[in-house]
Amino acid sequence: MTTPTVNNNVNSDALLQARDALKEAPQAAEFVWKVTSEWKDGTYSRQTIEHFSGLGAAQQHKQAFTLEGDHPEVFASEDRAPTPVETVLAGLAGCLTAGVAAVAQNRGIQLHSVRATVEGNHNVLGILGGDPEVRNGFNDVNVRFDIDADASPEDIAALVAQSQKRSAVFDALANPTNVNVSVG
Protein backbone atom coordinates (compact mmCIF):
# COMPACT_ATOMS: atom_id res chain seq x y z
CA MET A 1 0.00 0.00 0.00
CA THR A 2 1.32 3.47 -0.88
CA THR A 3 0.61 6.59 1.10
CA PRO A 4 -0.90 9.34 -1.05
CA THR A 5 1.24 12.44 -1.44
CA VAL A 6 -0.16 15.55 0.16
CA ASN A 7 0.37 18.77 -1.78
CA ASN A 8 -0.98 21.98 -0.30
CA ASN A 9 1.84 23.82 -2.11
CA VAL A 10 3.67 24.61 1.14
CA ASN A 11 7.35 23.70 1.45
CA SER A 12 7.16 22.61 5.07
CA ASP A 13 10.59 20.93 4.87
CA ALA A 14 12.19 24.29 4.02
CA LEU A 15 10.23 26.00 6.81
CA LEU A 16 11.38 23.44 9.35
CA GLN A 17 14.99 23.71 8.13
CA ALA A 18 14.81 27.51 8.44
CA ARG A 19 13.42 27.16 11.97
CA ASP A 20 16.26 24.84 12.95
CA ALA A 21 18.90 27.13 11.41
CA LEU A 22 17.45 30.17 13.20
CA LYS A 23 17.53 28.30 16.51
CA GLU A 24 21.31 28.04 15.99
CA ALA A 25 21.61 31.75 15.07
CA PRO A 26 18.84 33.51 17.02
CA GLN A 27 20.07 37.01 16.14
CA ALA A 28 19.14 36.28 12.50
CA ALA A 29 15.55 35.62 13.62
CA GLU A 30 15.08 39.28 14.54
CA PHE A 31 13.03 40.84 11.73
CA VAL A 32 11.77 44.39 11.25
CA TRP A 33 8.72 44.70 9.00
CA LYS A 34 8.18 48.10 7.44
CA VAL A 35 5.21 49.87 5.88
CA THR A 36 5.13 53.47 4.72
CA SER A 37 1.88 55.39 4.44
CA GLU A 38 1.26 58.43 2.29
CA TRP A 39 -1.82 60.60 2.74
CA LYS A 40 -3.59 61.34 -0.55
CA ASP A 41 -6.64 63.39 0.46
CA GLY A 42 -9.54 63.26 2.85
CA THR A 43 -9.28 60.01 4.77
CA TYR A 44 -7.66 58.24 1.80
CA SER A 45 -4.06 56.98 2.02
CA ARG A 46 -1.78 54.53 0.25
CA GLN A 47 0.52 52.14 2.12
CA THR A 48 3.62 50.69 0.45
CA ILE A 49 5.34 47.51 1.56
CA GLU A 50 8.72 46.85 -0.01
CA HIS A 51 11.65 46.69 2.39
CA PHE A 52 12.22 44.77 5.60
CA SER A 53 15.19 43.42 7.49
CA GLY A 54 15.95 39.96 8.75
CA LEU A 55 18.59 37.25 8.65
CA GLY A 56 21.02 39.95 9.74
CA ALA A 57 20.61 42.12 6.64
CA ALA A 58 18.34 44.45 4.71
CA GLN A 59 15.82 42.54 2.59
CA GLN A 60 13.42 43.47 -0.19
CA HIS A 61 10.28 41.86 -1.59
CA LYS A 62 10.34 40.82 -5.26
CA GLN A 63 8.04 43.78 -5.90
CA ALA A 64 6.52 46.64 -3.95
CA PHE A 65 3.02 45.96 -2.66
CA THR A 66 0.44 48.65 -2.05
CA LEU A 67 -2.61 48.75 0.13
CA GLU A 68 -5.06 51.58 0.24
CA GLY A 69 -7.11 52.82 3.13
CA ASP A 70 -10.19 55.02 3.35
CA HIS A 71 -13.44 55.25 5.25
CA PRO A 72 -16.94 54.49 3.97
CA GLU A 73 -19.49 57.05 2.89
CA VAL A 74 -21.37 56.59 6.18
CA PHE A 75 -18.32 58.33 7.77
CA ALA A 76 -18.61 61.23 5.29
CA SER A 77 -15.74 59.82 3.22
CA GLU A 78 -15.45 58.56 -0.32
CA ASP A 79 -15.11 54.79 0.27
CA ARG A 80 -12.20 54.31 -2.15
CA ALA A 81 -10.61 51.48 -0.17
CA PRO A 82 -11.16 49.30 2.89
CA THR A 83 -10.91 50.89 6.30
CA PRO A 84 -7.68 50.32 8.22
CA VAL A 85 -9.56 48.15 10.75
CA GLU A 86 -10.74 45.92 7.89
CA THR A 87 -7.13 45.63 6.75
CA VAL A 88 -6.22 44.46 10.27
CA LEU A 89 -8.92 41.78 10.03
CA ALA A 90 -7.64 40.78 6.59
CA GLY A 91 -4.15 40.43 8.08
CA LEU A 92 -5.50 38.12 10.77
CA ALA A 93 -7.44 36.05 8.23
CA GLY A 94 -4.40 35.75 5.97
CA CYS A 95 -2.04 34.81 8.78
CA LEU A 96 -4.35 32.15 10.23
CA THR A 97 -5.18 30.72 6.80
CA ALA A 98 -1.49 30.48 5.84
CA GLY A 99 -0.86 28.73 9.14
CA VAL A 100 -3.61 26.19 8.48
CA ALA A 101 -2.03 25.37 5.10
CA ALA A 102 1.48 25.05 6.53
CA VAL A 103 0.39 22.90 9.48
CA ALA A 104 -1.75 20.70 7.22
CA GLN A 105 1.20 20.12 4.87
CA ASN A 106 3.48 19.26 7.79
CA ARG A 107 0.91 16.86 9.25
CA GLY A 108 0.18 15.17 5.92
CA ILE A 109 -3.39 16.47 5.58
CA GLN A 110 -4.65 17.27 2.09
CA LEU A 111 -6.70 20.46 1.99
CA HIS A 112 -9.46 20.96 -0.58
CA SER A 113 -10.71 24.34 0.57
CA VAL A 114 -10.16 26.73 3.45
CA ARG A 115 -12.32 29.77 4.10
CA ALA A 116 -11.92 32.07 7.08
CA THR A 117 -14.56 34.65 7.93
CA VAL A 118 -13.36 37.28 10.40
CA GLU A 119 -15.65 39.79 12.08
CA GLY A 120 -14.57 42.56 14.42
CA ASN A 121 -17.17 44.09 16.71
CA HIS A 122 -16.41 47.78 17.07
CA ASN A 123 -18.27 50.65 18.70
CA VAL A 124 -17.20 53.67 16.63
CA LEU A 125 -18.23 56.22 19.27
CA GLY A 126 -14.72 55.84 20.67
CA ILE A 127 -12.84 56.84 17.51
CA LEU A 128 -15.37 59.58 16.78
CA GLY A 129 -14.88 61.09 20.23
CA GLY A 130 -18.55 60.56 21.04
CA ASP A 131 -17.98 58.68 24.29
CA PRO A 132 -14.67 58.78 26.20
CA GLU A 133 -15.60 55.52 27.96
CA VAL A 134 -15.72 53.55 24.69
CA ARG A 135 -12.40 52.11 23.55
CA ASN A 136 -11.12 52.96 20.09
CA GLY A 137 -10.38 49.38 19.07
CA PHE A 138 -12.36 46.20 18.63
CA ASN A 139 -14.56 44.94 21.44
CA ASP A 140 -13.95 41.42 20.17
CA VAL A 141 -12.97 39.58 17.03
CA ASN A 142 -14.53 36.32 15.86
CA VAL A 143 -12.96 33.96 13.35
CA ARG A 144 -14.87 31.11 11.72
CA PHE A 145 -13.17 28.52 9.54
CA ASP A 146 -14.87 26.31 7.00
CA ILE A 147 -12.36 23.66 5.97
CA ASP A 148 -12.74 20.74 3.59
CA ALA A 149 -9.84 18.34 4.05
CA ASP A 150 -8.99 14.66 4.14
CA ALA A 151 -9.06 14.69 7.93
CA SER A 152 -11.34 14.14 10.88
CA PRO A 153 -13.12 17.08 12.52
CA GLU A 154 -10.73 16.68 15.46
CA ASP A 155 -7.69 16.88 13.19
CA ILE A 156 -9.11 19.96 11.46
CA ALA A 157 -9.73 21.62 14.84
CA ALA A 158 -6.13 20.80 15.78
CA LEU A 159 -4.89 22.47 12.54
CA VAL A 160 -6.74 25.65 13.43
CA ALA A 161 -5.54 25.55 17.05
CA GLN A 162 -1.89 25.18 15.96
CA SER A 163 -2.28 27.97 13.40
CA GLN A 164 -3.70 30.25 16.10
CA LYS A 165 -0.90 29.29 18.49
CA ARG A 166 1.79 30.31 15.95
CA SER A 167 0.07 33.33 14.34
CA ALA A 168 1.98 36.61 14.69
CA VAL A 169 -1.13 38.64 13.87
CA PHE A 170 -3.30 36.73 16.35
CA ASP A 171 -0.67 37.34 19.01
CA ALA A 172 -0.45 41.06 18.19
CA LEU A 173 -4.22 41.44 18.51
CA ALA A 174 -4.69 39.21 21.55
CA ASN A 175 -1.78 40.52 23.62
CA PRO A 176 -0.55 44.01 24.47
CA THR A 177 2.15 45.24 22.10
CA ASN A 178 4.28 48.33 22.71
CA VAL A 179 3.49 50.87 20.01
CA ASN A 180 5.60 54.03 19.91
CA VAL A 181 4.52 57.02 17.82
CA SER A 182 6.77 59.98 17.11
CA VAL A 183 6.90 63.01 14.87
CA GLY A 184 10.05 63.40 12.77
Image: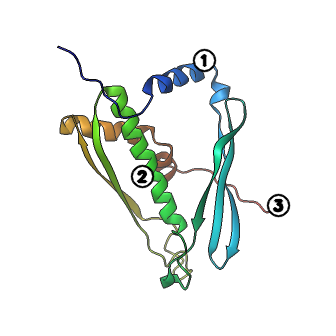
Q: Which residue corresponds to the image point at 46% horizontal and 57% vertical from the top-left?
A: 90
The answer to whether any part of residue 34 appears in the image is: no
The N terminus lies in quadrant: top left
The answer to whether any part of residue 73 appears in the image is: yes
The C terminus lies in quadrant: bottom right
Mark 3 residue element: loop
Label 2 belongs to which residue?
Answer: 93
The local crowd at label 3, few if under 14, some if 14 to 19, many if 20 or more residues have their Cα within 10 Å, is: few
Q: Which residue corresponds to the image point at 21% horizontal and 34% vertical from the top-left?
A: 151
Label 3 belongs to which residue?
Answer: 184
Name the amino acid type tagged 1.
Glu
Label 1 belongs to which residue?
Answer: 24
Query: Depth check: 140 or 95 in front?
Result: 95
Q: Position of residue 138 (x, y in %)?
A: 46, 64
For discs 1 and 2, the disc positioned in front in the rendered view: 2
Query: Depth check: 60 or 141 in front?
Result: 60
Query: Depth check: 9 or 93 in front?
Result: 9
Name the amino acid type tagged 2.
Ala
The answer to whether the residues at label 2 and label 3 have Cβ atoms under 8 Å apart is no
Mark 1 residue element: helix
Q: Closer to the N terminus: mark 1 or mark 3? A: 1
Q: Which residue corresponds to the image point at 19% horizontal and 39% vertical from the top-left?
A: 153
Vertical placement of 143 versus 136: above or below? Answer: above
Name the amino acid type tagged 3.
Gly
